[in-house]
Amino acid sequence: MNNKLTQLLSTKQKDILTLYFTAGFPKLESTISILKGLDSTDVDIIEVGIPFTDPVADGPVIQKSNTVALKNGITLPLLFKQLQEVNISKPIVLMGYFNQFLQFGAEQFCTQCKAANVSGLIIPDLPIAYFNTHYKELFDSNNLHNHYLITPQTSDERIREIDNISTSFIYAVADNSITGNTKDFNDAQVAYFKRIAMLKLKSPIQFGFGIYNNATFSKVCQYGHGGIIGSSFIKALEKGNSITDFVKNIRG
Amino acid sequence: MSRYTIDSEGFYGEFGGAFIPEMLVPNIQELQENYENIINSEAFKKEFISLLKNYVGRPSPLYYANNLSTHYNTTIFLKREDVNHTGSHKVNNTIGQVLIAKHLGKKYIIAETGAGQHGVATATVCALMNIKCKVFMGAKDVERQSSNYNRMNMLGAEVIPVTSGSKTLKDATNEALRYWIANPNAYYLIGSAIGPHPYPDMVTKLQSVIGDEIKQQLTNEYQQNKPNYVIACVGGGSNAAGSFYSFLEDEDVKLIGAEAHGKGEETGKSAATLNLGKKGVIHGCMTYLMQNKDGQIKEPYSISAGLDYPGIGPLHAHLYRTNRAQYIPVSDKEALKAAYFLTQKEGIIPALESAHALGVLEKLSFKKKDIVVVTLSGKGDKDIETYIKNSVK
């Protein structure tokens, strides 16, 4: 079976919109309705967060959604079951922390991803070198992409290294911060966006962190290939706002 | 290379490493590349040793506990970290790391704290060295340990109560890491031998003054070659790591860690990570941790706020796995009993943490001629209320 993310990235090079939501939030069964809801919009990639007790790279909004989802009773086996119940046409990427992956068992995790038609993973606390030695083959054999992060602090040299080994998009953290900021981009951030654009990398760039509306999304799309929105979508879901309207507003 | 030291990636065997998000890579790399050179430099050593001597009051006594020895029919020495300035071993590490931060040109310090001992030690050294500091403390701990909270404020630290998650040490650590991600100019002063490489090795080396002194004092003051046992309590494990470090290669010295067993396994209220936990990743390192089958991190329990951490330093995970050290669970009750016993026999009120190490004395049988060293990591002033509330006749 083809990897949906590979297909998407080979045909679409700009304005790629990824929306993140936390599995099992606001209700345990919300995973399914949100997936279906997003599938009928013109979002490009769906990123599903695996709730964790200690999400170190996440800000208060996503932390809270994690806590609520865990209270609702979400677990990895349940999430995989939910993913298999729906037939989603868009590529799905799972985001979670390394300990969950480790406890579930790397092989079983990857097999389940394949069965659930997941295209790739984002594991922010899994270092690149450790991934290459321990899991690269396993990912390849299950047709899964791993996604690497870069930040304003990452040197050009390291960005090029990451670009060389990346098989999918690079997740460019837009801000020296955790997720969930809602302020305008400052000069340093814009300079960083420009620096990335100037490197003319082979991998598509998806900016994430601090992207929350049409203005910030459009801005990062000028420099990269798209943007990832999480916290502000979680807030909209919590309020019970329409998913279609949310996507329309971002697209402008 | 010894089998008990880290490899080039910061692993003790299969434990350790640096499992950190990319946002922290530059900061951690800077520290990885520089900490050994700084620690080994003459300038650092001179300042560190001088402060340990004149400010902390080292060497701390190695006290021959005659009454305890008679009772247990063996030879017991107490390594008195409780008489250090600020009342525990924590200050050895904070002095060392504040000096390292200064060598790296860092302008301010952030730290996490549970019971507040590390927070106080950090705030103290920052006051001394005129460097700004921010301490993250779980909101629940702020309430439970108000005197340490007040001490930190008086010392000029900005204490930030953490209201995320379970509002205790692990959440304070998460919040400090989040703050560091957003403020990479800060220096993160971790209080135990935990966290991503190089912290476990760096903290162990800074605390190794404890074991070095034990070795020298046994030889010089008591004409003893080496101990048969070194016993210390383990939360994250910095005082134990510091006590064990000088003896790791002496395979005939038995190393014993006391883990906090709370109310016992059957109640689910324990903090005995090695005895009850499983291998995993917490706060940037591969180690043992208390978790459920889904890999969600469990909130540990102990009567002692300094031992209720869900992980453990990777050196201890390695010593446990290789059987170099033994880790014995000691319950709340056993620790309280041991604290009262020491107080009445020797006139020393130990910290609740250290009382767990004393609890081990009841659980092992010693020969008359055995030399048993117990590290008394801290003093019990902060625990008086708990002792009164749970008095042991």
Image (cartoon, grey):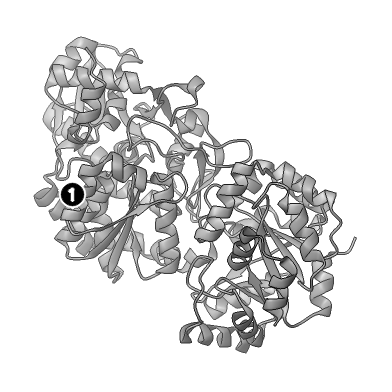
Residue situated in front as seen by the camera: B284 or A192: A192
Residue situated in front as seen by the camera: A233 or B76: A233
- The answer to whether A252 appears left or right of B18 in the picture is right
**In this rendering, is residue B82 above or below A67?**
above
> Which of the 4 image quadrants contains residue A242?
bottom right
Question: What amino acid is labelled 1 in the image?
Answer: Arg
- The structure residue drawn at horizontal position 48% and vertical position 22%, both measured from the top left corner, is B267
- The structure residue drawn at horizontal position 33% and vertical position 43%, both measured from the top left corner, is B141
Q: Which residue is mark 1?
A: B151
Observer able to see residue B355? yes
Residue A27 in the image: state x and y as whole percent: 67, 49
Q: Secondary structure at mark 1?
A: helix
Outermost residue, left side: B54
Residue situated in front as seen by the camera: A222 or B83: A222
Callout 1: chain: B
- The answer to whether A195 appears left or right of B43 in the picture is right
Q: Quadrant of the C terminus of chain B?
A: top left
Residue B232 in the image: state x and y as whole percent: 31, 31
- The answer to whether B249 appears left or right of B51 in the picture is right
**In this rendering, is residue A223 above or below A21?**
below
**In this rendering, is residue B194 above or below B387?**
below
Specify few, some or many for label 1: CA neighbours under 10 Å numbering under 14, 14-19, or 20 or more.
some
Residue B179 in the image: state x and y as whole percent: 41, 63
Q: How many marks?
A: 1
Observer able to see residue A91? no
Residue B99 in the image: state x and y as whole percent: 24, 61
Residue situated in front as seen by the camera: A240 or B146: A240
- The structure residue drawn at horizontal position 81% and vertical position 55%, both measured from the top left corner, is A142
Outermost residue, right side: A1
**In this rendering, is residue A157 above or below B93?**
below
